[in-house]
Amino acid sequence: MGEKKCPHCGEWSSWNQNLIDTCDHCGKTLGGVDLEYQERREAQKQANKEQWIFYIKETDSEFVKTVKKVGNFFYTVYISIITFIAWLIAALPG
Ligand SMILES: [Zn+2]
């Protein structure tokens, strides 16, 4: 339990180190800019994930989900091979 100056009304309010705690005086979240930043970062992360072609959405049909899982598998294998070749070239003498 601590205190934080509210970014909205400027009053000191009790808070539990949680960005979503609300101000005792105006009822707004105490996170302010930090919270906005955190939310924006989460949204960005989610957007990046959904842009991934094999991202499995809840709304996908079973068939699409299976295809995406297979796609993910082959992509992982492909990356492993590329990494291995890169390692091999680096490891070869001269
Ligand atoms: Zn406030």
Image (tube, rainbow, N blue to C red):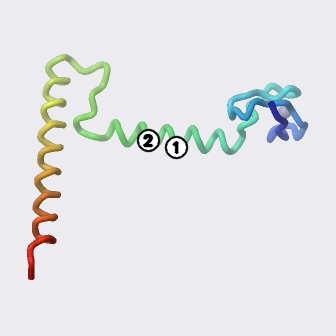
State how many labels appear.
2
- The image's mark for residue 81 is none
Residue 26 x %, y %: 85, 28
Residue 41 x %, y %: 52, 43
Measuring 63% from the left and 40% from the top, which residue is drawn there? Answer: 36
Left/right of residue 34 with respect to residue 48 in the rendered view: right
Q: Quadrant of residue 58?
A: top left
Q: Nearer the viewer, residue 76 or 33?
A: 76
Q: Which residue is mark 2?
A: 45
Q: Are marks 1 and 2 in contact (CB under 8 Å)?
A: yes
Measuring 68% from the left and 30% from the top, which residue is drawn there? Answer: 20
Q: Nearer the viewer, residue 77 or 46?
A: 77
Tell me if residue 52 comes above or below residue 65 in the rendering: below
CA–CA distance in space, label 1 to label 2: 6 Å
Q: Secondary structure at mark 2?
A: helix
Task: Tell me the amino acid under the disc marked 2.
Answer: Lys
The crowd level at tag 1 (other Cα within 10 Å; few <14, some 14-19, many 20+) is few
Quarter of the figure that contains the N terminus = top right
Q: Nearer the viewer, residue 55 or 19?
A: 19
Measuring 20% from the left and 17% from the top, which residue is drawn there? Answer: 61
Task: Tell me the amino acid under the disc marked 1.
Answer: Arg
Q: Decide if ligand 1 comes within 8 Å of the CB at mark 1.
A: no
Q: Quadrant of residue 47?
A: top left
- The image's mark for residue 41 is 1
Q: Secondary structure at mark 1?
A: helix
Residue 24 x %, y %: 86, 26
Q: Quadrant of residue 7?
A: top right
Task: Name the quarter showing ligand 1.
Answer: top right
Q: Decide if ligand 1 comes within 8 Å of the CB at mark 2.
A: no
Measuring 30% from the left and 25% from the top, which residue is drawn there? Answer: 57
Left/right of residue 33 with respect to residue 64 in the rendered view: right
Left/right of residue 81 with respect to residue 61 in the rendered view: left
